Amino acid sequence: MKGKADTSKKGDGRLKAGGGAGKRKKAAASGKPKRPPSAFFVFMSEFRQQYNAQHPENKSVAAVSKAAGEKWRSMSDEEKQPYVDQAGQKKQDYEKTKANFDKKESTSSKKAKTQDDDGSDKSKSEVDDEDGGSDKENDEDE
């Protein structure tokens, strides 16, 4: 029985990991702006190009990431400063874009609410019942 408990825990972990991917797809499909990269990721994009040019035979993402991490840790704060500045600029751009997106999103949701409200408290099915109704009820009256 001990084995059964262990397998259920493994299965639960796999389900949780799969749920997060759907959220990312949904956010991308809605047009929401992507979060800005950190200073390390700005560095990583430049480093990846240099590393791949020097090591064209290497196809391992892990090897590139490991080399980038080692180089980043060995860099001084002065060497990291250009990447920090670029990341700061990208963050400012993101904040502007996000503010515009939020404004547009809030106005479009308000428009949708006003279009859906026709002033009555009845659902569409109740309105349809009153208008068309069932033919059986009309047949019985005749």
Image (cartoon, grey):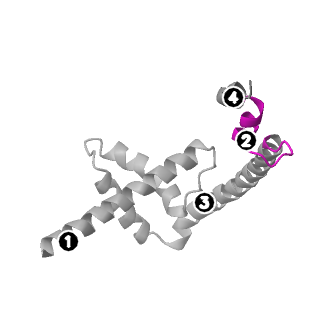
The mark nearer the N terminus, 2 or 4, is 2
> Which quadrant of the figure has residue 86?
bottom right
- Residue 125, magenta (yes or no): yes
The disc, 2 or 1, on the residue closer to the chain's N-terminal end is 1
Instruction: Please name which of the two marks, 2 or 4, marks the residue nearer to the observer.
Output: 4
Give above or below for 82 relative to 134.
below
Q: Position of residue 79 (x, y in %)?
A: 52, 66
| SS for callout 1 | helix
Q: Quadrant of the N terminus?
A: bottom left
Separation of marks 4 and 3 at Cα, in angstroms: 75 Å
Q: CA distance from mark 2 to mark 3?
A: 55 Å
Task: State left or right for residue 34 relative to residue 71.
Answer: right
Residue corresponding to mark 1: 6
The reply to whether the C-beta atoms of the residues labelled 2 and 1 are less than 8 Å apart is no
Residue at horizontal 76 percent and vertical 50 percent from the top: 100
CA gap, disc 1 and disc 3: 43 Å
What's the amino acid at mark 2?
Glu
Task: For label 3, count other residues whose C-alpha is less than 10 Å away and answer few (under 14), some (14-19) or many (20+).
Answer: many
| Residue at the disc numbered 2 | 126
Which residue does the numbered mark 3 point to in the structure image?
87
Tell me where residue 61 appears, x and y as whole percent. Answer: 32, 51
Quadrant into which the C terminus falls: top right
- Which residue is under mark 4? 140
Label 3, secondary structure: give it: helix
